[in-house]
Structures are given as structure tokens and as C-alpha cells.
């Protein structure tokens, strides 16, 4: 449980005094009744609205974004636009960050959260949560490339974990890649070893959770409790 004024301040990214003023002015309702006190202790079962808009009383949020090109995976950027910058205003709360990174020109599934423990679970090398991508290539795959990916490729002096690689079209220029680690520019470098250039790269799945196909580039939505649990990394008492 947490105080109503603190919850509103965190969720709306405003000061506690501004949150108290909203409560005082009658803009805040708890379970369809006007809030009476800023120190009301909110539970996960409370339905809270501010100026007619419902906000979640959960401590943690989990957002699925279909990242567009030209946006960096960071919470802050000096001159460049970040995935947090392009969130809808009503989703922006304090301490959000992307759980993992995609290159600036890579599109697809980015998971944004304020739950550091969850992000650690997703990114931990010990967990090996698989990430699935579609890669458009400048030349077709052949069996030797697939065998190298699946055998655990040597990339420079580093031995990679086995990755899954398969052709998705007859021309063998569209590939599905599943990796279980995340080193710098990994997929592009793996193909480059075989003199293949990646023209387009899109992440379409994290673990067992696919990117929602209804999300256009730059669009996002909250991830549901069953979807979070399907990742196998979030205990029931932390799911939204």
C-alpha cells in the first residue's frame, strides 16, 4: 500500500504538492467516490481516477512497444529521441526504462518497465530468455550459415550460445533468428561473418510473448498479467 498523493505524483510525474492540490480540488476519485485525504492508503484493488482518467494503483508497470526506426532504447537522450520520450502522456511515469536494447535502426518489441528486478530476470545471461527476430538479408542463406548459427558461432574470440536460424521465404532472404544472449550488434555481426548484410531487423518476440501485431510502429500498450506470467519471470504478487 502507498499514500494516495505519492501514487498520483509517481503516476503523473508531478510533485506531491501538485497531487495534493488535485485531491483538494475534487479531481481525484477512489472507487467512484471523491478522495477525502492525500494520506489514504491505496491497495491494488482500488480504482483511482484523476480528472476522469483512470490510473493504475500497481507499483510496477510493463509496457509493450513496437519501436520505430530512429529512436534509441534509453530512458534519456541528450539530443536523440528515446522510447520513453514517445510514450503517450498518460503512460509516462517516473523511473521507466527499456528492459534491454535494440539498435537505433532496429524495429519491433521493446519492453518498458519500472521494475528493476523483472528487467534483471529478462536480461540475465543465466536466464537465457530467447529473443526472436526477423531479418531481411541482401543475399540468401545457405546451409553453412544455418549450421554455424546453430552450432554456437565463434565471433571474434567469443564463443556464442547456439542460435536458431531458418528461412522464412522461398528466396531465403528473410530469416527468423532466435538468440539467447545479447551482445553488441550480435545478429548483424553474425551475418556479416558470412558476408551477408542485414537490411532490416525487427524483434517479434521476447520469450513466449509475441509482439502484438495490431500495434503500429511507435504504438504501445500495457502487458497483461497472463502475458507477463507467460514469460516465466514475474511472480504472481508482482504481476499487474
Image: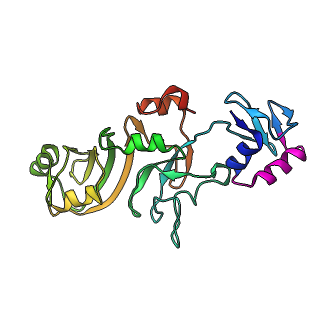
**Vertical arrangement, residue 193 with respect to residue 130, above or below:** below
User: What is the x, y in percent for residue 42?
Assistant: 73, 33
**Vertical arrangement, residue 215 with respect to residue 104, above or below:** above
- Residue 240 lies within the magenta run: no
Residues rendered magenta in the picture? 13-28
User: What is the x, y in percent for residue 8?
Assistant: 73, 45
Q: Quadrant of the N terminus?
A: top right
User: What is the x, y in percent for residue 168?
Assistant: 26, 45
Q: Which of the 4 image quarters holds residue 183?
A: bottom left
- Residue 17 lies within the magenta run: yes
Q: Is residue 157 left or right of residue 33?
A: left
Q: Residue at x 41, y 33 (%)?
A: 231
**Vertical arrangement, residue 186 with respect to residue 225, above or below:** below
Q: Residue at x 40, y 30 (%)?
A: 232
Q: Residue at x 53, y 63 (%)?
A: 76
Q: Is residue 211 left or right of residue 193?
A: right
Q: How is the image coloured?
A: rainbow
Q: Residue at x 89, y 46 (%)?
A: 24
Q: Which of the 4 image quarters holds residue 191?
A: bottom left
Amino acid at each position: 500500500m502507498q499514500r494516495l498523493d505519492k501514487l498520483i505524483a509517481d503516476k503523473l510525474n508531478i510533485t506531491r504538492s501538485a497531487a495534493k492540490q488535485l485531491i483538494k480540488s475534487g479531481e481525484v476519485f477512489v472507487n467512484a467516490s471523491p478522495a477525502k485525504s492525500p494520506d489514504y492508503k491505496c491497495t491494488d484493488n482500488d480504482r483511482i481516477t484523476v480528472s476522469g482518467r483512470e490510473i493504475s494503483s500497481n507499483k510496477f508497470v510493463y509496457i509493450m512497444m513496437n519501436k520505430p526506426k530512429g529512436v534509441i532504447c534509453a530512458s534519456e537522450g541528450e539530443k536523440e529521441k528515446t522510447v520513453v520520450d514517445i510514450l503517450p502522456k498518460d503512460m509516462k511515469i517516473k523511473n521507466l526504462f527499456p528492459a534491454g536494447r535494440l539498435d537505433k535502426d532496429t524495429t519491433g518489441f521493446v519492453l518498458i518497465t519500472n521494475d528493476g528486478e523483472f528487467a534483471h530476470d529478462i536480461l540475465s545471461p543465466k536466464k537465457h530468455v530467447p529473443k526472436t527476430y526477423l531479418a531481411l538479408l541482401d543475399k540468401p542463406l545457405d546451409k553453412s550459415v544455418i549450421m554455424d548459427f546453430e552450432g554456437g558461432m565463434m565471433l571474434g574470440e567469443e564463443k556464442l550460445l547456439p542460435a536458431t536460424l531458418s528461412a522464412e521465404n522461398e528466396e531465403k532472404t528473410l530469416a527468423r533468428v532466435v538468440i539467447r544472449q545479447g551482445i553488441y550488434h550480435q545478429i548483424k555481426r553474425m551475418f556479416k561473418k558470412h558476408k551477408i548484410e542485414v537490411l532490416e531487423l525487427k524483434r517479434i518476440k521476447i520469450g513466449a510473448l509475441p509482439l502484438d501485431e495490431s500495434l503500429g510502429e511507435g504504438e504501445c500498450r500495457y502487458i497483461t498479467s497472463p502475458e507477463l506470467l507467460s514469460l516465466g519471470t514475474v511472480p504472481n504478487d508482482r504481476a499487474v
